[in-house]
């Protein structure tokens, strides 16, 4: 909560300072900062029901990670968030009542082409690297039991007891031909997701396959979503 107040304070004040038992920030000019008023909407990443409700209570947008949990579990988090956001106690001047979901997206002309592009190895690369980075830098003090609870598929994969296709079968990722991807995206919308953050460049996917996926999203998926009156925010974020 304090961190959010600090960031928004930096956005809105030419000079900013903050002092508390946890933070001691001397008076400074912080740049760059947005010029719009009110400030941009603030979001809170949440992967548990408790934190989802907190995001709603604070008047923040909910940023969820579909690949980290079954969709039904994410739907429960969204319901908790929607209930909490009805009567928020905002920590910023702008209430953001939207839900965004982040997941891996790879669209090809056929499902077989997705597999030929190396989608399964690339999905596992993403999950493994996220897990290793998170556990090493954010939770190094956790016990092995606690680590297994956060990333349960790591141990299963090490023991040879995991088929990476489980991500696809549970709709935790969006992979397939345009019709398959559209069906999955519509399901996300039906669960209450307002904004889908599509991560397209991951693992060992060839550049040409990534570009084709983006092209299919733009020519096949976005027009169909718009036709169905599902709001689409067309932005491409390039990784340096």
Image: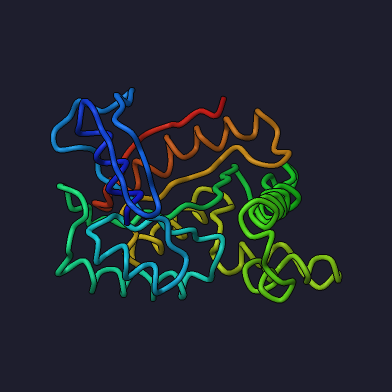
Residue 112 seen: no
What residue appears at the point 62 percent right and 68 percent down from the top-left corner?
Answer: 150
What residue appears at the point 20 percent right and 49 percent down from the top-left corner?
Answer: 92
Q: How many marks?
A: 0
Answer left or right for 118 relative to 99: right
Q: Position of residue 99 (x, y in %)?
A: 32, 57
Answer left or right for 112 relative to 94: right
Quadrant position of residue 158: bottom right
Q: Position of residue 71 (x, y in %)?
A: 48, 69
Whether 166 is drawn above or below 43: the answer is below
What residue appears at the point 24 percent right and 51 percent down from the top-left corner?
Answer: 229
Answer left or right for 115 relative to 178: right
121 or 56, which is in the foreground?
56
Whether 235 is drawn above or below 69: the answer is above
What residue appears at the point 46 percent right and 31 percent down from the top-left corner?
Answer: 237
124 or 184, which is in the foreground?
124
45 or 161, which is in the foreground?
45
Q: Residue furthest right?
A: 159
Quadrant position of residue 21: bottom left
Answer left or right for 48 relative to 105: left
Quadrant position of residue 77: bottom left
How is this picture coloured? Answer: rainbow
Q: Position of residue 27 (x, y in %)?
A: 29, 30
Q: Position of residue 129 (x, y in %)?
A: 70, 49
Whether 42 is drawn above or below 16: the answer is below
């Amino acid at each position: 909560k304090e961190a959010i107040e600090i960031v928004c304070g930096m956005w809105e004040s030419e000079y900013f300072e903050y002092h508390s038992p946890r933070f001691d920030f001397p008076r400074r000019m912080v740049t760059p900062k947005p010029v719009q008023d009110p400030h941009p909407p603030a979001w809170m990443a949440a992967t548990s029901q408790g934190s989802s409700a907190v995001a709603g209570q604070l008047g923040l947008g909910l940023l969820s990670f579909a690949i980290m949990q079954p969709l039904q579990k994410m739907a429960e988090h969204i319901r908790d968030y929607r209930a909490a956001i009805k009567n928020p106690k905002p920590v910023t001047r702008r209430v953001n009542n939207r839900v965004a979901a982040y997941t891996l997206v790879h669209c090809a002309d056929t499902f077989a082409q997705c597999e030929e592009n190396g989608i399964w190895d690339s999905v596992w690369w993403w999950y493994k690297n996220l897990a290793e980075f998170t556990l090493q830098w954010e939770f190094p003090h956790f016990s092995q039991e606690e680590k297994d609870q956060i990333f349960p598929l790591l141990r299963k994969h090490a023991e040879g007891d995991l088929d990476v296709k489980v991500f696809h079968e549970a709709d935790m990722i969006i992979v397939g031909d345009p019709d398959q991807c559209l069906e999955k995206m519509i399901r996300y919308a039906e669960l209450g997701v307002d904004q889908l953050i599509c991560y397209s460049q991951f693992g060992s996917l060839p550049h040409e396959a990534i570009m084709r996926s983006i092209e299919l999203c733009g020519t096949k998926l976005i027009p169909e979503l718009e036709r169905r009156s599902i709001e689409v925010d067309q932005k491409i974020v390039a990784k340096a």
